Image: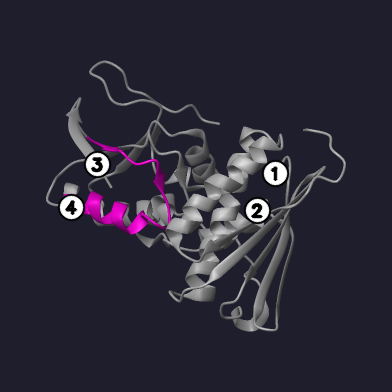
Amino acid sequence: MQCEVTPPPFAITLRAEYLAVRDSLVELAGFALRRGYGAAFSADFQIIMGEVLNNIVEHAYAGEPGDIVVTLTPHAKGIAVHLSDWGRPMASGILPAGHMPQVYPAEVFDQPEGGFGWAIIRSMARDLVYRHEVGCNILTFSVPIMVE
Amino acid sequence: MTLESCIMAGRFVVSVRAPRIDAASAIEFKEAIRTLTDGGHGPVMLDLGEVGFLDSSGLGALVAVRKFLGPDRPLELARLTPPVDRVLRLTRMDSIFPIHIGLPTETLSDQRHAM
């Protein structure tokens, strides 16, 4: 990883639309690569960022137009992420536990199709914190290097 | 979502000519596979060699396709790129879909080695 004195944060604003999320993920993964985090971390980073951003599109904005602001702060052990949106607050104000859904190889026709998003987020993020204040949802977390 | 299909060594192989199966394209992907495989018989092998990104929406679409095909038509995956393989292993969905390193040939049966 590159050694720098206080690397500047990286911020983007995107429309809350799935195609805009897709474009932003390419940009965010590219940022991680340029900062020297490596291909494996950058691929994981793209996965978790996709899950949290798509959640905002689907649940916070639920089809309504709006913006999402993403701020990334690199640090020695990974990347700190700060997300802001102005959509609906999260129901109950508590983040989903995100247990990885049970997989049923023998009973694939009972296999749920959803529930993997939060499980993926929980497996890759640390220090996940959500708050809602003055009409704004704020989600912060860190994506550490060497995530299993 | 462009799909190409052919028969290889008796298997119906569907190659996905799209770089991403994600929230923006998962529904389109699911419908395109359904249209292509509807009324057919036998196992379906999805060649995902060009797909560099698959998210939870894409996973859900794979499960939906599997259910649509029914108990007599297994859905197998081939030529997974590392990010797609990563998501399938992370969610343990690699235990639902047989995974092949390559496409079927007349003489080889490509098996993914157990991790």
Q: Is residue B16 found inside the magenta-colored segment of the image?
A: yes
Q: Is residue A129 above or below residue A40?
A: below
Q: Which label was assigned to residue B35?
A: 4
Residue A75 image offset from top left, x and y in percent: 81, 46
Magenta segment: does it hold A30? Answer: no
Residue A59 appears at what percent x and percent y? 51, 73
Secondary structure at badge 2 equals helix
Q: Around disc 4, counting alpha carbons within 10 Å, would you say few (fewer than 14), some (14 to 19), or many (20 or more)?
A: few
Check disc 3 and give the amino acid type.
Answer: Leu
Q: Is there CB contact under 8 Å for labels 3 and 1?
A: no
Gap between marks 2 and 3 measured at Cα = 32 Å
Range of magenta residues: B13-35
Going from the N terminus, do you reach mark 2 or mark 1 first?
Answer: 2
Q: Which residue is mark 3?
A: B3
Residue A100 at least partly seen = no
User: Which residue lies at the image location 19% right of the left edge and 41% below the top edge?
Assistant: B42
Badge 4: chain ID:
B
| Pointers 2 and 4 in contact (C-beta within 8 Å) | no
Q: Nearer the viewer, mark 3 or mark 4?
A: 3
Few, some or many residues within 10 Å of mark 2 (<14, 14–19, 20+):
some
Instruction: Residue at 79% x, 33% y: name it.
Output: A2
